[in-house]
Image (cartoon, rainbow, N blue to C red):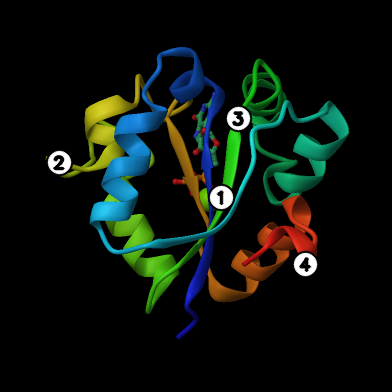
Amino acid sequence: MGNRTLAILKPDSVRKNHIGDIIKMILQAGFKIKGMKMIKMTKESAKVFYFIHKDRAFYNDLVEYMTSGHCIPMALEKENAVTEFRKLIGATDPTQADEGTVRKLYAKDKAENAVHGSDSDDNAEIEIAHFFSTQELI
Ligand code: GDP
Ligand code: MG
């Protein structure tokens, strides 16, 4: 059971000024922020980040969306971080997400869904390394 996960406040959250409210939810849920930056991902970076979905019909739309504006990757720490963060953000599709979750509150639909959360401890480490050098992490 790992203690780190990679979150991204996606471009729709930045555009709609939801980042303050979402970061507040993250902190109130007991996560520690170990790294954070605001960037505009390149197409190349987004393609690599979502390579696991390369054969899905929505892959190109996903890359377009994730590069449509600035986003905020965050390295987060908490016991059992991956599972705990996915609980906080709720299901991919906001219509399926539990009340009070980030996606229920802020996602438009299953494509523009406000936040990313790693899906396993191994992927969390790969994803943190995608965005952060060691000197950028507490
Ligand atoms: P997650 O782990 O809950 O983020 O969901 P997935 O790993 O299944 O999908 C990755 C991301 O692709 C989602 O968070 C959405 O932004 C996007 N996505 C998922 N399903 C669809 C879809 O049917 N259409 C589009 N356009 N995007 C999707
Ligand atoms: Mg996923």
The mark closer to the camera, 1 or 2, is: 1
The mark closer to the camera, 4 or 2, is: 4
Q: Amino acid at mark 3?
A: Cys
Q: Which quadrant of the figure contains the C terminus?
A: bottom right
Q: Is residue 87 above or below residue 51?
A: below
Q: Which residue is mark 2?
A: 100
Q: CA distance from mark 4 to mark 2?
A: 34 Å
Seen at 83% across and 27% down, the residue is 43
- The crowding category of the residue bearing disc 3, from other C-alpha atoms within 10 Å (few below 14, some 14 to 19, many at least 20), is many
Q: How many marks?
A: 4
Seen at 64% across and 27% down, the residue is 66
In the rendered structure, the answer to whether residue 22 lies left or right of residue 10 reads left
Query: Of callouts 3 and 4, which one flags the residue occurring earlier in the amino acid sequence?
Result: 3
Tell me the number on the disc at residue 74.
Answer: 1
Tell me the number on the disc at residue 71.
Answer: 3
Q: Is residue 136 above or below residue 101?
A: below
Seen at 74% across and 56% down, the residue is 132
Q: Is residue 33 visible?
A: yes
Mark 1: secondary structure: strand
Q: Is residue 117 above or below residue 3?
A: above
